[in-house]
Image (cartoon, rainbow, N blue to C red):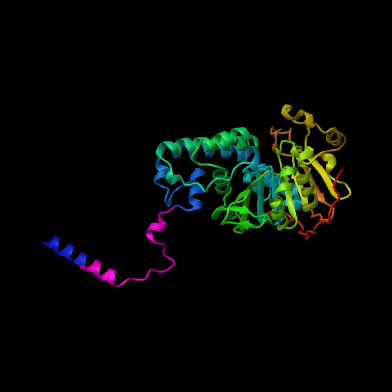
């Protein structure tokens, strides 16, 4: 009898509520939406990070995820100690004009390597990565079966391991790994790097460029890309663009939309590494010259712009580390004048490896600054004061770099 009365009461109450809707405050998400994982949830899952309070917490209890998280933690800890941490400590001293600059960063032949772009240049307002690997769609791990989830996470780790171990992607292997998974394209890799770098993804969009280099979202063109808006580690909103595009000279002549897009960003900082020495070839001189004309700094290994191709009337160029020459696969791109620079100058070492010669004390790092840019002072760490008996010692704070306004460079002559 009591149960019948309770059921009748609930039935009448439900009817009354159906006739008189109760407004829900806008700040309270509906239960159905609250269960849908966000792009940031997806990124943290792919990155093997804690899923406490996430809609993906149930999936995270699977053995495949636990193995994925454990393996990535170990690989990341090694990369942090061996490379990423030393880069963050060294960059403000070695690249003072670029590392603190909020100007956009243009990283060509990048693959999905947001990791090194952010580690070297954490303050860029905008990151533009350009490579031939496909963009893919925003990943959704909830659509994977148990077997698909395990294999997809393994293939993702295979792709990541090369970058974390050697500082570069192996293009053929990455293509194979990305095709053999339900997590397609470069977006899953970008998600992992964003999450592991401590960034919070706000919005992800598939985009395209029209003939004028304008971003469109309602129609597909030859130049496909992704736009990711995120909160950086300092709480500022930053934007990452990845474009799947051919930047050979003939392709840029046929479809200049990528360069037109970059024109709209103003003066940028340039970055490249493990670039297959493509800008040593005449087929890639258009992008080489674009970097020399539109960037006020250029950071690269020896596989980027040739040492002789920096016009010294307009660029100050120096090198760090060591120059052992290219690996055997690219031995034809040995630069005798660069070797002579290392032989005849006291070149400062770098405490990390980068590029194809990824081992410590074998890496080459080249840094150019356009002469039209005002050089910044290198930070100086003051000595600690000598303690006197009974007095509290307050450590002196490092002197911050002197920030000078960047002057956009004038057009440079095209090197012969």
In this view, 4 is above or below 298: below
Instruction: Name the residue at the bottom extreme.
Output: 20
User: 76 or 306: nearer the eye?
Assistant: 306
- The magenta region covers 12-36
Residue 155 lies, in percent from the top left, at 52, 35
Instruction: Name the residue at the front extreme.
Output: 254
Q: 43 left or right of 416?
A: left
Residue 203 lies, in percent from the top left, at 54, 56
Residue 276 lies, in percent from the top left, at 71, 36
Q: 242 left or right of 142?
A: right
Q: Was residue 48 drawn as part of the magenta stretch in this picture?
A: no
Query: Would residue 111 be visible to someone looking at this image?
Result: yes
Quarter occupied by the N terminus: bottom left
At x 50% / y 44%, what residue is drawn?
Answer: 46
User: 380 or 204: nearer the eye?
Assistant: 204
Q: Quadrant of residue 173?
A: top right
Residue 75 lies, in percent from the top left, at 56, 36
Query: Would residue 387 be visible to someone looking at this image?
Result: no
Q: 308 left or right of 112?
A: right
User: 160 or 15: nearer the eye?
Assistant: 15
Q: Quadrant of residue 327?
A: top right
Instruction: Name the residue at the left extreme.
Output: 1
């Amino acid at each position: 009898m009591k149960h019948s009365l309770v059921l009748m009461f609930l039935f009448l109450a439900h009817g009354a509520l159906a006739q008189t809707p109760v407004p829900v405050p806008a700040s309270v998400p509906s239960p159905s939406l609250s269960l849908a994982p966000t792009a940031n949830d997806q990124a943290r899952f792919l990155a093997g990070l804690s899923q406490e309070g996430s809609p993906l917490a149930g999936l995270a209890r699977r053995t495949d995820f636990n193995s994925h998280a454990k393996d990535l933690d170990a690989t990341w800890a090694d990369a942090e100690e061996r490379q990423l941490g030393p880069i963050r400590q060294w960059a403000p001293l070695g690249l003072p004009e670029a590392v603190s600059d909020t100007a956009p960063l243009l990283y060509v032949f990048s693959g999905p390597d947001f990791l090194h772009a952010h580690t070297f240049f954490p303050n860029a307002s905008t990151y533009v990565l350009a490579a031939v690997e496909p963009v893919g769609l925003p990943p959704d791990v909830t659509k994977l079966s148990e077997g698909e989830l395990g294999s997809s996470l393994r293939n993702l780790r295979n792709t990541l391991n090369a970058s974390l171990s050697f500082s570069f992607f192996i293009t053929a292997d990455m293509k194979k790994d990305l095709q053999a998974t339900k997590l397609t394209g470069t977006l899953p890799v970008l998600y992992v790097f964003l999450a592991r770098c401590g960034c919070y993804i706000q919005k992800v969009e598939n985009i395209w460029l029209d003939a004028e280099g304008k971003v469109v979202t309602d129609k597909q063109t030859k130049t496909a890309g992704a736009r990711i808006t995120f909160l950086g580690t300092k709480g500022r909103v930053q934007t990452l663009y990845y474009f799947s595009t051919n930047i050979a000279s003939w392709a840029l002549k046929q479809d200049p939309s990528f360069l037109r897009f970059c024109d709209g960003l103003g003066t940028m900082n340039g970055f490249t590494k493990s670039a297959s020495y493509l800008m040593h070839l005449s087929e890639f001189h258009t992008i080489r010259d674009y970097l020399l004309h539109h960037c006020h700094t250029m950071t690269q290994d020896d596989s980027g712009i040739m040492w002789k191709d920096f016009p010294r009337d307009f660029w100050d160029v120096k090198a760090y580390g060591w120059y052992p020459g290219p690996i055997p696969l690219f031995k034809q791109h040995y630069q005798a004048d660069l070797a002579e620079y290392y032989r005849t100058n006291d070149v400062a070492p770098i405490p990390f490896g980068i590029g194809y010669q990824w081992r410590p004390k074998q890496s080459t790092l080249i840094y150019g600054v356009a002469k039209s840019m005002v050089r910044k002072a290198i930070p100086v760490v003051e000595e600690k004061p000598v303690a006197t008996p009974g007095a509290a010692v307050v450590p002196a704070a490092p002197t911050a770099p002197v920030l000078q306004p960047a002057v956009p460079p004038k057009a440079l002559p095209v090197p012969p």
